[in-house]
Amino acid sequence: MPVSRHHNVTHALAAVFAMIFGLSATAQSDVLDLTTLTASDAAHQLCAGSLTSEQLVSAYLAQAKTKPQLNAFVMLDEAGAMKAARAADIARQRGAFCMPLSGVPVLIKTNIQVQSLPTTDGTPALQNFVASADAPVVAKLRSAGAIVLGITSMHETAFGITGYNPVYRYEAQVGIRNAYDVSRIAGGSSSGNGAALGARIALAALGTDTGGSVRIPCAFNGCAALRPTVGRYSQEGIAPLSHTRDTAGPMAQSVADLELLDRVIAGGTPVERADLKQVRLGVAPEFFANLDADTRTATDAALTKLRAAGVTLVDVEMPQLRALDDATEFPIVLYEVRDDLGAYLAKYHTGVDLKQLASEIASPDEKAAYEDQVIPRKMPGPNGVVDIKPIYDRVMQVTRPAMQKLYRDTFVKYRLDALVFPTVPRVAPAATPDVYKPEIFRIMIQNSGPGSVVGIPGLQLPSGLGASSGLPVGIELDGPAGSDRHLLSIGMAVEGVLGRLPPPK
């Protein structure tokens, strides 16, 4: 059912906790602290029998309804989630094998298909499209015992990083909003996931990332996110932008949660925290341009802590990076989305084609991009618009391979486990139409974009709160292709040094 826009927060939570635990109001807060709970903790407690899935799901459903101003949800599947929670509890009571996510509620971004639930891609033309089957990545989570709590909102068609999507409104407020300051954007395109995790109204979520779309919302909302190596996760049943760059990715309260979710989706054995004294992280100046004061201060402090913990920080040079990235990043998506999204719309019998979808797009900047560039396959050139096909061909044959080689050579030359840098150069900007400006977009993807182009894994975790803004700042680790599990082991150790952020006030 849709999330109610009118809810008495105090009475709802008190009633739920009283019903769940049968405790007085003063004792309730000591039983289930949603501000500190992680998916890994919950899975352990559920398996041990010290917590029931019905208790957990009920608590998060109630908590989700207390934050309508975030616009984080397309819908909460209250009936489905409670039915699954009760079934999980009964199975456990009867001695069923305890699966990795048995009874743990998760959120799914609305461009990823969940059977019988809306897969809207955040755009009006698909508001009534309901998936007939789970996407393989969702099926993996469910087969491990996860319960889908709800479907989350997003930047329209994932074609942006702000979440300032006019499809979603709360009273006069446009778009998905930041958990730490509702006057700010949540980031995107996995906006609802980021806002819900930051607000502690979810344990874990599944999003998608083409140029930063799981990492940027978590940088802005203080959560952890993994963009896996392209191809590690199935992309079937997910509304696409670019087969070259798209990937699903987990988002959660901690890196240990990401490790658990990644292991469920992609397989592999559990990893332990890395020994930071054996870790080499590269620091390239190209990723430290355009930082605001809060981001620079928080990042410097984080690097100082890591150095003190034994990490070897290595100054590296990647002088060709920006030129290669500028030539490569946009042509790939602008060219591939027409065929990729068009084929998806037809394959899954959505009832609309790409031109119909574009005609109903609500975001003015995005609508113009589809009509002027995506559908006619044009892009801005020095003297007006030009055909994109020759540019795309050169990108795929020359510049992207050169960029991939630059990354491979950098990792080898400096013997790096990963590159380290601020995930986003600035804290979350104000949620106003100004965020549509191209210069905002370019700055926001400055650091997350390049790794997406070459297809390597990227791990975002919080580094601190801005000294003046009080907003979350994120730090990212980008590792060589295929190093996902090693990157997560490093991330768990880094998180042990930097800690998790306090919840929003």
Image (cartoon, rainbow, N blue to C red):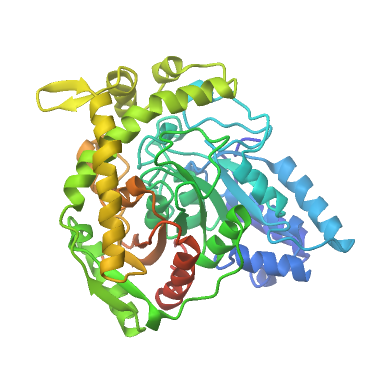
Give the camera-side residue of 272 and 40. Answer: 272
Q: Residue at x 63, y 69 (%)?
A: 41
Q: 40 left or right of 124?
A: right
Q: Quadrant of residue 264?
A: bottom right
Specify the quadrant that holds the N terminus: top right
Indicate whether 124 appears above or below 302: above
Q: Residue furthest front?
A: 397
Q: Quadrant of the C terminus?
A: bottom left
Please tell me whether residue 347 is drawn above or below residue 97 in the rendered image.
above
Left or right of residue 18, residue 324 in this image: left
- Which of the pair 99/399 is nearer the observer? 399
**Residue that extends furthest to the right in the rendered view of this protein:** 94
Figure quadrant of residue 432: top left
Which residue is depicted at the point 81% across and 57% down? 89
Residue 395: horizontal and vertical position, in percent?
A: 26, 37
How many marks are shown on the rendered structure? 0
**Is residue 381 positioned above or below 495 on the image?**
above
* Residue 114 on image: x %, y %: 64, 37
Depth check: 424 or 435 in front?
424
Asked if one can make out residue 19 in the rendered structure from this viewpoint, the answer is yes
Percent position of residue 299, x then y: 28, 68
Q: Residue furthest left?
A: 383
User: In the picture provided, is 392 more to the left or to the right than 463?
Assistant: left
Which corner quadrant of the image does residue 244 belong to? Answer: top left
From the top left corner, tell me how far across and down residue 398 is, in percent.
24, 40
Does residue 4 show up?
no
Please name the residue shown 45% across and 81% down the image: 275
**Looking at the image, residue 345 lies above or below residue 282:** above
